[in-house]
Image: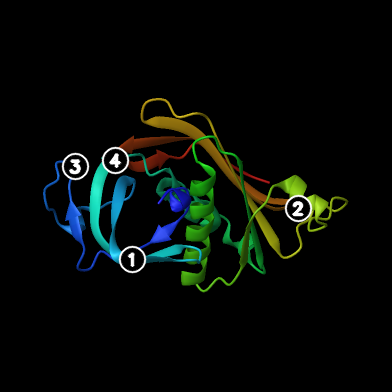
Amino acid sequence: MSEISASLVTLSVKETLVTDQNGKKTEASGLKNGMVIDVVMGEDASIAESYPGQIHGQKEIRIVGQENDVTGMYLDALKEIYQIDPGLNSGVKIMALDLSMSVNMSEAEKSALAYQWDSWLRSQSQDMDVYQKSYDELVEEGMIDTEKLYFPEGMLITIEDKEIKGDSFVFSISKWCSGLGADGLDNCKAVFEDGIGTYTKGTAWIS
């Protein structure tokens, strides 16, 4: 399992034994975001080489612990910033996520967030190409016009956070299409309780 421990994988809980931290059988409905689990594979189990990976033939899911669901909280923040000033979203076909300044997500979590964000956009009938790229990378690839400060048919959403202390941290999130087309929320405070994160909005700005 070490090869996929840092990747996003899916599996069905149907007809799979689920046990709690005391080794007792529990309901699959007790599983929630941010939980740490061990997956016990059956003799005929397999993992499809796809993204996300797909586990088949598991025989037990063991709940090991609970961590903060940072990606789930950030998915909510992405939805909110996207819906602010919806006129900026018109004609966007390329969605870039700059997660390079987030210190509270691992690389696997950043990839998982990008995947979840892509899935949500498609559920809203927004057919876009989603990439993890910074402003500088987009410039290097010729995707941003630096003279006109314009991202043709594209949007860049940037997340920057400060290291988590206890069960809270501060972050900022913004979306940018051009020098005169940008919105942001600065100094938002994320708080986690039993692994589930909520946040209060900080200072809103529009360019």
Q: Nearer the viewer, mark 4 or mark 2?
A: 4
Give the mark nearer the N terminus: 3 vs 4.
3
Pick the residue in front: 66 or 25: 25
Q: Nearer the viewer, mark 2 or mark 3?
A: 3
State the SS at label 2.
helix
Question: Residue type at mark 2?
Answer: Leu
Pick the residue in front: 52 or 91: 52
Color encoding of the figure: rainbow
Q: Position of residue 33 (x, y in %)?
A: 32, 50
Q: Which residue is mark 1?
A: 45
Q: What label does residue 138 carry, if any?
A: 2
Q: What label does residue 21 carry, if any?
A: 3
Q: Residue at x 30, y 54 (%)?
A: 39
State the SS at label 4.
strand
Q: What label does residue 86 carry, if any?
A: none
Pick the residue in front: 138 or 91: 138
Q: What label does residue 66 carry, if any?
A: 4
Q: Position of residue 56 (x, y in %)?
A: 34, 68
Question: Residue type at mark 4?
Answer: Gln
Pick the residue in front: 155 or 2: 2
Question: Residue type at mark 1?
Answer: Ala
Q: Calculate the distance from the C-alpha at mark 3 to the C-alpha at mark 1.
A: 23 Å
Q: Residue at x 54, y 34 (%)?
A: 103
Question: Residue type at mark 3?
Answer: Gln
State the SS at label 3.
loop
Q: Calculate the distance from the C-alpha at mark 3 to the C-alpha at mark 4.
A: 10 Å
